[in-house]
Amino acid sequence: MATIEVIKERSMILQKEMIEGLFNDLEKAHETGKKVCYTFVPGNLSELIRCFDMLPVYPEINALQSAMRKKSAAYIKEAERHAHSEDVCTYVKCDVGMLMKGNIGPTGQKLPPPDILLLSYTGCFTFMKWFETLKREYPNAKVVMIHTPYQEGGKMTPEMVNYMVKQMHEEVIPKMEEVSGIKYDENKLKKILQYSKEAEDWITKIFETPKHRPSPIDAYFAGVYYIGPINIGFRGTPEAVEYYKELYNEIQERIRLGLGPVTPEGEMKEEKFRLVVEGPPNWTSFREFWKIFYDMGAVIVASSYTKVGGVYDLGWRHDPEKPLQSLAEYCMNCYTNLNIPQRIDLLTKCIKEYGADGYVTNSIKSCNSFSAGQLAMMREIEDKLEIPVGFIESDLVDPRYFSYSNIKNRLESYFQMLSQRKMMEAEETH
Amino acid sequence: MRNINNIISRCEELAFDLDFTRAKEWKNEDKSRVIVGYMPIYFPREIIHAAGGLPVAIFGGGDRKQIIKGDAYYQSYICHIPRSIIDMALDKHFDNFDGFIFPSICDVLRNLSGIFRTKGFGKFVKYMDFPQNFLPEVGGVFYQDEMRHVLHYIKEINGIKVTPERLNHSIGLYNKNRRLIEFIYDIREKYPWRLSMKDWYHILRAGTVIPVEEHNEILEEVAEYVKGDVGQRQDKVKVVLSGAFCEQPSVGLIRSVEDAGCYIVDDDLQLGSRMVIGDIDATSEEPLAAIAHAYIFQSRYSSSIYDVDNPKEYRLAKIVEERNADGVIFASASFCDPSLLDAPIFQNAFDRMGIRYIAFQFSENINQFKVIKEQVGAFSDSIKLWEDEPSSIPVAE
């Protein structure tokens, strides 16, 4: 098979450098005396971690990067040898397997053990079980859990906010102070949050650019790179603001030139289909998966997955004037913490505002937080908007559940249906 | 006292009446009455009772309902219970139910609450977020707020204002219910042949779909019965069954475990009815605070409750010890995240502790148990035939 020369935009290189820098810092954490905080992306309290000068580790990011580097299969098998079921989240198994095999991170550097396990239990029940497992693997780590209430009624109530703020005062901050030896400084947090707000403004503008035709970006396959810095600890830094400004300017230039998205094989030449995608991508065969879409001229103009670390497109931002309340609201406002009617409304809005031709669900075997309810959501959206819907199945990081032929066949049939529909619509217009 | 066989037979009817006939009859007797369905695992039924309602547990269709519509709502890799619940809802089994409560146990049932909202089932749908923070002034206060929401929904329907007196009365009734249940468990621990697990399961489960007053009467009669020297001891080992707290195995599976040489002396099948250990204070001027206090300080371990400060493996090991059990059978519903994610924690700990166990998966609608029966039989034989220690079951007194 011929090697594909991957074309990278400057912003992608910048992002890579930021992540490599983090892993380098983590490798040297023992020498530098920096404390290490393991936490999760949805509802991550990056600003608070930064406020206490800690370094974050995101187990699910390690897992997805391991998958992209084709290492996840061996890690998963290792975990399954130790009683982990075939039927549960493969992020968990990949992470546990990686730990059992020496905790060598995706960059090939050894990851330091956690000084603190900060569980911001947001939108995913498995996170809680994952940390129960990690606690047993790292008995010396301090554990702090912040329970994020689910937006069951489609809103954040004052009781929910109070509950979270009280947890921060009573549990999270005292334990972080104890581990870091640093006193909580609200003014420092406010300054960090100001950068968060700015980064959120920029990323919102970036994800609005697919409203243009042709879309200058792919908001799913490239989008997962774009959300990297804001999701993995750089939110709240001037570097992240700079990165997103740079990225936005690059995209504006593409719009000016009338260019479509950059793919691993260059610019997508013709935009045939505009899609909204629900669900995380498959990481083990990420390039092949993406290629099926861009080969068919399909661009993803909006996706739910890029909102997993925060929903900013409805106007919510971190507010430096209400630091802890703002962190609480952030946690509650991540995509998987929205109830099903909220998710339907959000996706409906995307389909309408981004002029999508179709709606595709990538249903992930091991992620019930996303997957349970996706069929009902799809049915609702189809009924409400009369839009063609597509459904494929894969997994996050377990290569056994990525069936290229099945997915390609299903998508090709779906694109044929979209083509026919477009032709019929064109005929009706004439 | 009624004949025990008649009681068991009636309980079996009640437990698996997928039309909830008794609950609906009860509701029709008074216009202010409401029925509130709740999903596994635990819900403080006292508050619904105090508000003039009947809490009715929804455990899905088991092996008694063919799923047709439900499969269109759930992928093959999601557990079975949500598809059978949605199938029951679409087939109008829950007609006359006023509201539905989804306790926070996993992402699947959480998202099912959203589907119920979207479909407009019931007059209210409440996802009940149980606190994972166990400070009374933090998680306890939040839990009280959650309970107040439920009371508010019911008051909107029937206008009943819940007073501390009403709540304390209801707490007292459920205290009695829990005491009777534990009394029978304690008898069964020593003399499991007096009441089979299958029959006991029917009796327990019946209590989740009828008024607590009626269930208490049944339990009193059953308690009297098991006090007597009834049944005949068989050469079986004693086991604790763990992991089937939400989606329920079919009764055939329970019977197969017993037939294969095991007395089930403790289990988490109907965990919700036993979640609180001991009494809840029924004299408090703030009964909601008392319920919250009991949840925080008197709960059993559960795969859906964050356990870092109170590890579940030691709590299950303690149950095994206290029940003089010979081992543990881990029975997890297929694709059940809470149960399966706990499996390595339990099993690795039990390997270290030397507690014998086996593990298998089931689905509520399977009724072929040959493989499971062989596995359980081998487990039982291995304990009986090759262990140095004799079986810990005492000779009948």
Image (cartoon, grey):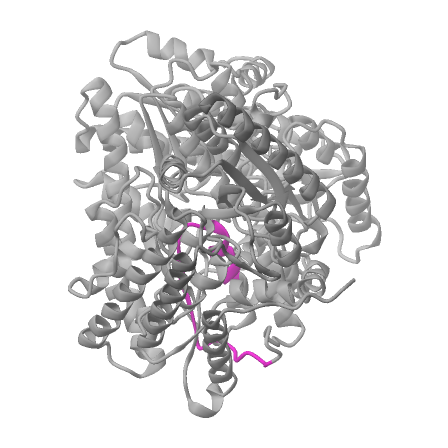
Q: Residue furthest bottom?
A: A31
Answer above or below: position of A153 versus B356: above
In the image, residue A129 lies in the stretch drawn in magenta: yes
Query: Which residue is outermost to the right?
Result: B385
Q: Residue furthest front?
A: A430
Which residue appears at 61% of the width and 49% of the height? Answer: B340
User: Can residue B41 be seen here?
Assistant: no
Residue A257 appears left or right of B353 = left
Look at 44% across and 41% down and name the residue there: B275
**Is residue B49 located in the magenta-colored stretch of the structure?**
no
Relative depth, front residue between B190 and B99:
B99
Q: Residue A206, relative to residue A149: is it above or below?
A: below
B387 displayed left or right of B397: right
Q: Is residue A113 visible?
A: yes
In the rendering, at what x and y percent does residue A345 appear?
36, 36
Q: Is residue B127 left or right of residue A62?
A: left
Q: Residue at x 37, y 61 (%)?
A: A252
Q: Which residues are magenta?
A: A109-132
Q: Is residue A349 left or right of residue B61?
A: left
